[in-house]
Image (tube, rainbow, N blue to C red):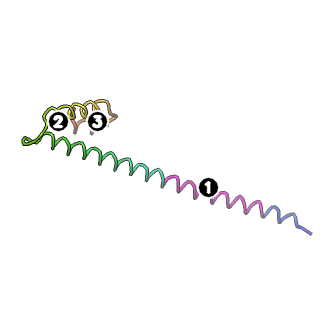
Amino acid sequence: MANGNDGQSRIEFLKQKEREIRAALAIEQVKRAKREKRETQNLESLMGRAALRRLDVLKDPVGGEPKEAEALTSSLKDALRTATLTERERKLLRAKGWL
């Protein structure tokens, strides 16, 4: 005949498993958030480098496109003016002539 304690021990076992699963899920969610943040930072860096390299090509005295360089510079400055930046970032951009 089944003992009443068997049902109780099964419930405790399942509750413990639930806690373990929730803890593992929380760890994975943190890892995922960190990975997504790192990927976003890499993308922003890559896009910024590409824009600055393109600007260098357009500004080249031999074979450059001054009007396109002006347009790209203006677009980048507009984007920076409306971007959410820290004071430190704004200070750097001002020092480099971007704000």
Q: CA distance from mark 2 to mark 1?
A: 53 Å
Q: Which residue is mark 1?
A: 22
User: Which amino acid type is shown beneath numbered disc 1?
Assistant: Arg
Q: Is 45 above or below relative to 6?
A: above
- The image position of residue 20, as x and y in percent, is 63, 60
Q: Secondary structure at mark 1?
A: helix
Q: Secondary structure at mark 3?
A: helix
Among numbered discs 1 and 3, the one appearing first in the sequence = 1
Is 90 positioned to the left or the right of 66 in the image? right
- The image position of residue 9, as x and y in percent, is 78, 64
- The image position of residue 57, as x and y in percent, is 15, 44
Q: CA distance from mark 1 to mark 3?
A: 39 Å
Mark nearest the camera among 3 and 2 is 2
The residues colored magenta run 10-30
Residue closer to the observer: 69 or 42: 69
Image point (48%, 53%), residue name: 32
Q: Which residue is mark 2?
A: 69
Among numbered discs 3 and 2, the one appearing first in the sequence = 2
Q: CA distance from mark 3 to mark 2?
A: 27 Å
